[in-house]
Image: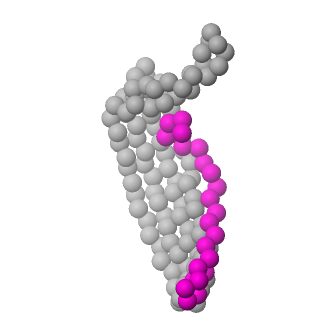
Amino acid sequence: MCFDINSNLFFIYNARVVNQFYRLNSTTKSYDLTPENTKYYHEYGLQLSGYYKSLKNNIIVLKALIRPTAQKILLNDGISIENNYIGNLVTFSNDYKSFNIQYQINIPVYRLQGAF
């Protein structure tokens, strides 16, 4: 049995960021994608990652990543947009000689990173 656990704290701050937002157009009754200048964007959280090898080799390996994160955007008109999420990724892999099989599982989460 072999395992490793890592943790990282992170903080990202960007001043005067250009973001894209969908705004309701009252004349056409549709949403328009509009770029807007914002005062700042910041993101902070904790990232936990690690792996587990049951046989001390790479025949069966389980890797996991969990990343609880908080995001905030402050618009020029004073409106604050906040989002909290838990990023995740689980990987099962099998290595034997020159043969490798890998399967990844990721539960999608909503992030404040623009429209796309």
> Whole-percent x and y of residue 64?
56, 68
Asked whether, in this view, residue 17 is left or right of residue 66, the answer is left
| Vertical comparison of 12 with 41: above or below | below
| Vertical comparison of 75 with 10: above or below | above
Classify residue 41 by image quadrant: top left
Residue positioned 62% across, 59% down in the render: 106
Part of the protein shown in magenta: 94-116
| Vertical comparison of 87 with 72: above or below | below
Asked whether, in this view, residue 39 is left or right of residue 50, the answer is left
Q: Quadrant of the N terminus?
A: bottom right
Residue lying farthest left?
A: 15
> Whole-percent x and y of residue 27?
62, 9
| Vertical comparison of 106 with 51: above or below | above
> Whole-percent x and y of residue 26?
62, 12
Residue positioned 41% across, 62% down in the render: 8
Residue positioned 35% across, 42% down in the render: 13
Classify residue 19 by image quadrant: top left
Q: How is the image coloured?
A: one colour
Asked whether, in this view, residue 101 is left or right of residue 14, the answer is right
Q: Examine the rendering and report whether any part of residue 82 can be seen.
A: no
Residue lying farthest right?
A: 29
Classify residue 98 by image quadrant: bottom right
Q: Quadrant of the C terminus?
A: top right
> Whole-percent x and y of residue 92?
62, 73
Residue positioned 46% across, 37% down in the render: 72
Residue 55 drawn in magenta: no
